């Protein structure tokens, strides 16, 4: 006798009519269908993005079936989001491929990183479109300088979210003017379009950051408030 398998709930079902009726009316099945629909939509978005990407640049693997390419993008994205080094995919390849899709060696899979980054930035630009955002930026002052820009906003679920939009590793510290130029560049290219919804810029009280904000706010009307770190201010008062 044949078996029935519910794709939404990922489980085998009895072929009894009454049990099937009960199953299709259950809250668990409805929730499973919702998740499956959004998964299929996400996969379709990846396929469309890959097609756009192929037009600009023919990547290795573009002769593979779309489903295999989508699977590879999803695996690499999941490892990146979990902070797991991609070489570990090689150790888990057997179990990951048990779903029926093939992977490739991690040295090939890592070529998908620029594509995934572009997609993430596109998604972020869509999420930020029309929203008020604030930015937070700072750099280290030691050897192997790192400079980071973070955007902070309220997402569609009313949750306060923060995303790193730029992390630069520099050979020397930036001066105030350079920081201002970098901020303008990041906010126009990474955050996208006219960034007129920046309600505040947060930074510590290092003089380089103060100069940067003076320069940035002088050159643009996009940012309405410059907020210096209160902890630094309290420490100054204590002195
Ligand atoms: Zn079901």
Image: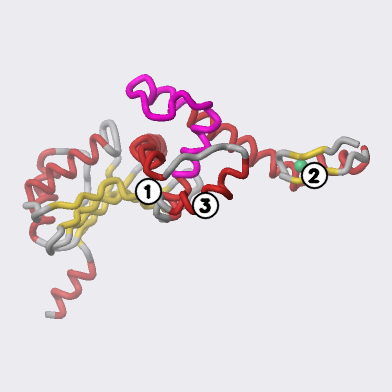
Residue 200 x, y percent position in the rendering: 25, 50
Quarter of the rendering containing residue 97: top right
Q: Residue at x 19, y 52 (%)?
A: 169
3 or 1: tag closer to the N-terminus? 3
Mark 3 lies on a secondary structure that is helix
Q: Which mark is residue 12?
A: 2
Residue 64 x, y percent position in the rendering: 49, 27
Q: Is residue 97 magenta?
A: no
Main secondary structure found in the magenta portion: helix
Mark 2 lies on a secondary structure that is strand
Would you say 10 lies left or right of 1 here? Answer: left
Q: Which residue is mark 3?
A: 92
Q: Residue at x 6, y 52 (%)?
A: 175
Residue 156 x, y percent position in the rendering: 48, 43
Q: Which mark is residue 180?
A: none
Q: Which mark is residue 153?
A: 1
The magenta-colored residue range is: 48-76
Q: CA distance from mark 3 to mark 1?
A: 36 Å
Quadrant assignment for ligand 1: top right
Packing grade of label 1 (10 A; few <14, some 14-19, many >=20) is some
Quarter of the rendering containing residue 40: top right
Packing grade of label 2 (10 A; few <14, some 14-19, many >=20) is few
Mark 1 lies on a secondary structure that is strand
Would you say 139 lies left or right of 78 here? Answer: left
Decide which of 64, 157 is in the foreground and name it. 64
Q: Residue at x 23, y 51 (%)?
A: 201
Is disc 2 in contact with disc 1, using a CB cutoff of under 8 Å?
A: no
Say whether mark 3 is within 8 Å of ligand 1: no
Decide which of 53, 128 is in the foreground and name it. 53
Say whether mark 1 is within 8 Å of ligand 1: no
Residue 33 visible within the image: yes
């Amino acid at each position: 006798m044949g078996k029935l398998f519910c794709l939404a709930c990922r489980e085998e079902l009895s072929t009894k009519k009454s049990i099937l009726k009960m199953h299709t009316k259950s809250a668990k099945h409805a929730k499973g269908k919702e998740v499956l629909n959004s998964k299929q939509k996400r996969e379709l978005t990846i396929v469309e993005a890959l097609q756009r990407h192929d037009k600009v640049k023919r990547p290795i693997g573009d002769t593979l079936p779309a489903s295999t390419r989508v699977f590879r993008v999803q695996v690499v994205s999941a490892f990146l989001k979990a902070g797991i080094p991609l070489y570990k995919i090689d150790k888990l390849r057997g179990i990951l491929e048990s779903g029926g899709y093939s992977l490739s060696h991690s040295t090939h899979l890592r070529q998908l990183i620029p594509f995934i980054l572009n997609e993430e930035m596109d998604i972020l630009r869509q999420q930020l479109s029309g929203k008020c955002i604030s930015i937070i930026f700072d750099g280290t002052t030691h050897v192997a300088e790192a400079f980071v820009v973070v955007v902070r906003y309220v997402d569609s679920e009313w949750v306060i979210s923060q995303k790193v939009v730029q992390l630069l590793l520099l050979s020397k510290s930036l001066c105030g003017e350079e920081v201002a130029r970098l901020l303008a560049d990041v906010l126009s290219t990474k955050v996208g379009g006219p960034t007129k919804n920046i309600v505040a810029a947060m930074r510590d009280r290092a003089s380089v950051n103060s100069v940067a904000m003076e320069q940035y706010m002088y050159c643009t009307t996009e940012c309405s408030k410059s907020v210096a770190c209160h902890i630094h201010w309290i420490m100054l008062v204590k002195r």
